[in-house]
Amino acid sequence: MLGFLKKNNMKPKFPEDSKTIQTDIVLPADTNSLDTLFGGELMARMDKVASIAAIKHSENIVVTASVNNISFGEPVYKGSILTIEAKVSRAFNTSMEVFIDVYKQDKTHKEKKKVNEAIFTFVALNKYGKPVNVPDVVPQTDLEKKRYDAALRRRQLSLVLAGKMKPKEATELKSIFE
Ligand SMILES: CC(C)(COP(=O)(O)OP(=O)(O)OC[C@H]1O[C@@H](n2cnc3c(N)ncnc32)[C@H](O)[C@@H]1OP(=O)(O)O)[C@@H](O)C(=O)NCCC(=O)NCCS
């Protein structure tokens, strides 16, 4: 599949090609008055890790265009080890959806538990700040295929909410808007 040339001779890539993992500890300065990780700190860490995944995929400068979803499943206590994994789940023309999975290990560091998911959209830019095309994504695993399929629906919802697409043009969302 990777031998197939598309979009200005750009080879499609696998989600695994953009996989980016950050492991870090939750320090007192990262927490709120309940001694749990401050949501804004987690969002900043996710943005950084996801942007690196988008840079790997596009081999270009990227900017965050939208944050499509963040869910905070469980509190993460001071002293926990936090692992943030990001992969490009689908690419369109100049934009890429990046899926982020967050895991924690508490102070005993025995169990690694998923606590959070998020979905960000990045746009690749050239050195003049203009959007540029990115390679397609070829999903491999069942989870990657599921995320790839749903990404079109999420893109349309994000564009409708941003006022950049008319609801009637959102082909994947007809059941919501009609
Ligand atoms: C993101 C940005 C580059 C888009 O520029 P633009 O002039 O609107 O460009 P376009 O309308 O051509 O859109 C470019 C791509 O972004 C996508 N996009 C724009 N807004 C989007 C949104 N809210 N959700 C999802 N995708 C979006 C478009 O669908 C398009 O994707 P495609 O090429 O794959 O079809 C521009 O709005 C920008 O620079 N924003 C600031 C980015 C930034 O500073 N981020 C950090 C903030 S803390």
Image (cartoon, grey):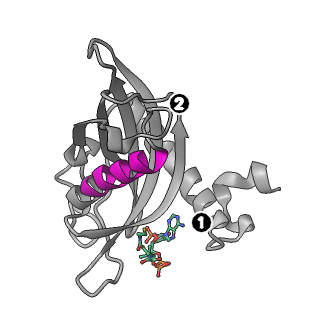
Residue 108 visible within the image: yes
Q: Which of disc 2 and disc 1 is earlier in sequence?
A: 2
In the foreground, 38 or 50: 38
In the foreground, 57 or 108: 108
For residue 59, side relative to residue 44 (left or right): left
When asked about the image quadrant of residue 140, the answer is top left
Which residue sits at x=29%, y=33%?
83
Q: What span is colored magenta in the figure?
A: 39-52
Which residue sits at x=19%, y=64%?
59
Tag on residue 73?
2
SS for dot 1? helix
The residues bearing labels 1 and 2 have C-alpha atoms spaced at a distance of 26 Å
Residue 139 visible within the image: no
Position of 173 relative to 60 (above/below): above
When asked about the image quadrant of residue 97, the answer is bottom left
Report if residue 133 lies within the magenta region. no
Most extreme residue toward the bottom, as rendered? 128
Predominant SS of the magenta segment:
helix
Position of 27 relative to 169 (above/below): above
SS for dot 2? loop
Which residue sits at x=31%, y=32%?
82
Residue 38 at x, y = what percent?
A: 45, 43
Image quarter where the C terminus lies is: bottom right
Which residue sits at x=56%, y=52%?
154
Position of 91 relative to 107 (above/below): below
In the foreground, 139 or 63: 63
What residue did someone put label 1 on? 159
Three-letter code for the amino acid on which mark 2 is drawn: Gly
